Image (cartoon, rainbow, N blue to C red):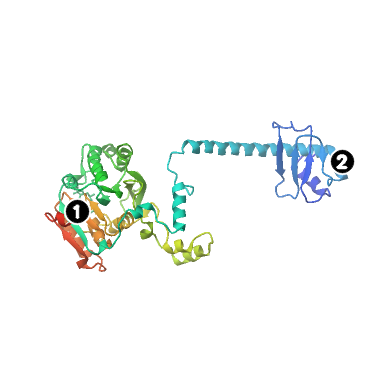
Amino acid sequence: MFSTEDKAVEWLESTTWSESPICLHCGGIENIGEYKFKKFTYWYKNRYKSFTIKTGKIMHSSKIGVQMWTSLIDHMVFLANAYLQAAELWKQEADWRWTKYKIQINQGRLKEMANRSHRNSGLLSINKMRKEGKQHSSFNLIDIADKCKNTKHLILNKDCFSFLKTVPDNSIQLIVCDPPYNVSIADWDKHDNYIDWCDAWLKESERVLKPTGNIVIFGGLQYQEEAGSGDLISIVHHMRSASKMKLVNFIVWNYPNGMSAHRFFANRHEGIAWFGKTKKYYFDLDSIRESYDEQTKLIYLKDKRLRSETIEKGRNPTNVWRINRLNGNSKERVGHPTQKPSELIRRIVKSMSSPGSIVLDFFAGSAVTSRVAIEEGRHSVSVDSNKNIFEYFGNHLEQISGDVDYSSFNILLENEELKHPLFKAQ
Ligand SMILES: C[S@@+](CC[C@H](N)C(=O)[O-])C[C@H]1O[C@@H](n2cnc3c(N)ncnc32)[C@H](O)[C@@H]1O
């Protein structure tokens, strides 16, 4: 009798059989242990023998040899041990199968939820189109022509609602919306019923966006007692039932610089909720890909599974964007207290609007959106209820990139609305 598995193995290894798998058909011991087996294949890991153990008659392969018969009793005991061990493995396997089965059931139940994995059917069809050199249908709805050579930028000191009601339906490609966060940092930053107030400009936004249009809404997660007054999470939650627009991404703007904290983790992010008006929202990923460094590129180019043209284009920047906030002494500062970095707005403008299309920002603050629109060849409209918008925007103009030709854009102010492409067609 083998007291330990090792002894049994020692005995097995002392036999003369060949290295080919050996079939042992054993009867009468299938009830040993708690488990009955119909069929079980048990590979003795890291050994050079393997067994197929079946219920049924006692049989042996012709290669087993005489020693097997002389040690039949020991052999049966060994098999019993093997059975018990196999039973344990079988049970583990059964547990695992059951877990997988449960996962599959859940997957079935959750079928309606958006699936962003590599099995996503939308993604598969986009990959197929790319291989065939075709573009997504949203690109066909956009007239990219040569309209970006002379762009127009309307800067207005107005309340957003009085402006929005003048905007034609389906006329705007992108709305950059950085609303008051309702945290009382200024007079304009407090609303008793924040979500009702947001609902009014959200409805107008949905109306004025083109079918290919996008809106990005900035916001944070308010703390403690402020939380009840509404924040970006409340806006997104509200839109689930109050709007037909589609949440495409919830982008995390992660900034490495910020205030310290002692009673909680120091905050280093804000949210940007991106909604497309319809499924045909415009998105130009190639315009904002991040280049790989030379070393990574060389490694990836050797990987046969990756396409060299995609490697050359660079990586998808993902929905976590690490971009510094503007410090008080940052060169880009034009005086607005909550000014956003142009790098952040640029990524949005480049990827969500085409050259020559119209970008609107009705909580414009410093009008950074118009500054970026000038640099990127889009038309823009910036509206803010604070008259300082003109001074801030003037400071932006002084900073615009030397690559921009001053004759390539026009600034329009109040009473010049009709010269802007947004109203021209009316
Ligand atoms: C968060 S700031 C925008 C900052 C801007 N993104 C920037 O980078 O400069 C919000 C702006 O909304 C403006 N605002 C608040 N209520 C408004 C309203 N009803 N109509 C138009 N502008 C409004 C405020 O004056 C403030 O400048």
Q: What's the amino acid at mark 2?
A: Trp
Q: Quadrant of residue 334?
A: bottom left
Q: CA distance from mark 1 to mark 2?
A: 99 Å
Residue 196 is at least partly visible in this image:
yes
Q: Which residue occupies the foreground of this view, 270 or 384?
A: 384
Where does the image place residue 159, in percent across and percent down from the top left?
Answer: 16, 46
Q: Residues within 10 Å of mark 2 (few under 14, many from 20)?
A: few
Q: Secondary structure at mark 2?
A: helix
Residue 85 is at least partly visible in this image:
no
Residue sitting at the far left:
415
In the picture of the structure, the residue carrying the numbered disc 1 is 425
In the picture of the structure, the residue carrying the numbered disc 2 is 69
Q: What's the amino acid at mark 1?
A: Ala
**Residue shown at the point (26%, 68%) measured from the top left:** 403
Where does the image place residue 368, in percent across and percent down from the top left?
Answer: 23, 57
Where does the image place residue 136, in percent across and percent down from the top left?
Answer: 39, 53
Left or right of residue 275, residue 204 in this image: left
Q: Which residue occupies the foreground of this view, 189 or 217?
A: 217
Mark 1 or 2, nearer chain start: 2
How many numbered marks, from 0 up?
Answer: 2
Left or right of residue 15, residue 176 in this image: left
